[in-house]
Image (tube, rainbow, N blue to C red):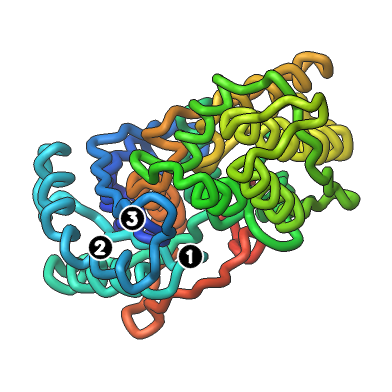
Amino acid sequence: MNAITKKKRRIALGCEGSANKLGIGVILHEGDLSSPSSTCTSRVLSNVRHTFVSPPGTGFLPKDTARHHRAFFVRVAKQALADAGVSAADIDCVCYTRGPGMGAPLTSVAVAARTLALLWGRDLVGVNHCVGHIEMGRAITGAEHPVVLYVSGGNTQVIAYAEQRYRIFGETLDIAVGNCLDRFARALAISNDPAPGYNIEQLAKQGGRVLLDLPYAVKGMDCSFSGILTRAEELAAQMKAGGKGPDGEPFTGADLCFSLQETVFAMLVEITERAMAHVGSSQVLIVGGVGCNERLQDMMGAMAADRGGSVYATDERFCIDNGIMIAHAGLLAYETGFRTLMEESTCTQRFRTDEVFVKWRR
């Protein structure tokens, strides 16, 4: 039995910076790890985030995002510790996002996490970003054995747990659904504050007079979003030039946002339902930044209800990239004896969900 399993209270600090969100959170796990019958609980002590926002019509470049993370890391870390009411002496391990994500931002946060681990004399734990989303979603919602729809700016996957791995049943063949939405926002010069996907969602609520024809690209269990984006960009250019919709009337940016959401979300519902049927699950857990979208939740909820099932989702505190999910997943691994040696504390842009051995689940 190692030292950590003897502790009734365990605290981790998590550092996330795989894209434009810098997040640092502190989590507490309580319970007797030495007793198989003991129930362990988790509690969020702090969850601080700072976002790099680029001008409308632009995306966030890796070098600029990395500069933002370096500039704000110390401030966010201090705030996370203060909000949690803990000091460095209370922390058992420092967790960081090993990947997947954008190289430069990942590296900036990994260096900062290493620095804290060395300064405080604490163990380091590298965490898979996707697994962080899943474990935080399970902890917040209480979903037990769901099919997971992971949708974000960098990832689109349908996942189910089996034999200590999160198995990928379907995924995007090209760009992620969140990347599709973000890039479409640039075509309409939609603001990136607080997020382009959120602003598309609000505009879509004003549209719906007409459903514009966009490619529907489901291929087995996989999806393709690049052709949809290209066609949506073409329609945006036609709209600006005074083009008409299928009913001969002008259409608006809100109609475009509505049509794009309806099409890509219908695709996601289809492949999720197929995965539910395959594994015999009645639960869907939606994680990742796009998972905040209420229209996606509603469409998924209607499908699940028809199957006698239910949908689990979280709000923007936990759907959008955050440090607390890295702290939680990292501490789960740490409690099983996992450590990341300093000389092996790399980060990678490609780190698949099913590469992680999920030792903490049976």
Give me the C-alpha separation between circle 2 and circle 1.
14 Å
Residue 285 placed where, x, y %? Answer: 62, 33
Residue 147 appears anywhere in the view: no
Q: Quadrant of the C terminus?
A: top right
In this rendered view, identify the residue nearer to me: 39 or 178. Answer: 178
Mark 3 in CB contact with mark 2 (< 8 angstroms)? no
The residue lying at 37 percent from left, 64 percent from top is 125
Residue identifier under label 1: 101
Residue identifier under label 3: 54
Question: Looking at the picture, does residue 100 appear above or below residue 237?
Answer: below
Question: Looking at the picture, does residue 359 appear above or below residue 259?
Answer: below
Residue identifier under label 2: 69
Nearer the N terminus, badge 3 or badge 2?
3
Secondary structure under the numbered disc 2 in the rendered image = helix
Mark 2 in CB contact with mark 1 (< 8 angstroms)? no
The residue lying at 27 percent from left, 40 percent from top is 47
Nearer the N terminus, badge 2 or badge 1?
2
Q: Give the amino acid type for the residue marked by disc 1 in the picture.
A: Gly
In this rendered view, identify the residue nearer to me: 3 or 104. Answer: 104
Secondary structure under the numbered disc 3 in the rendered image = loop
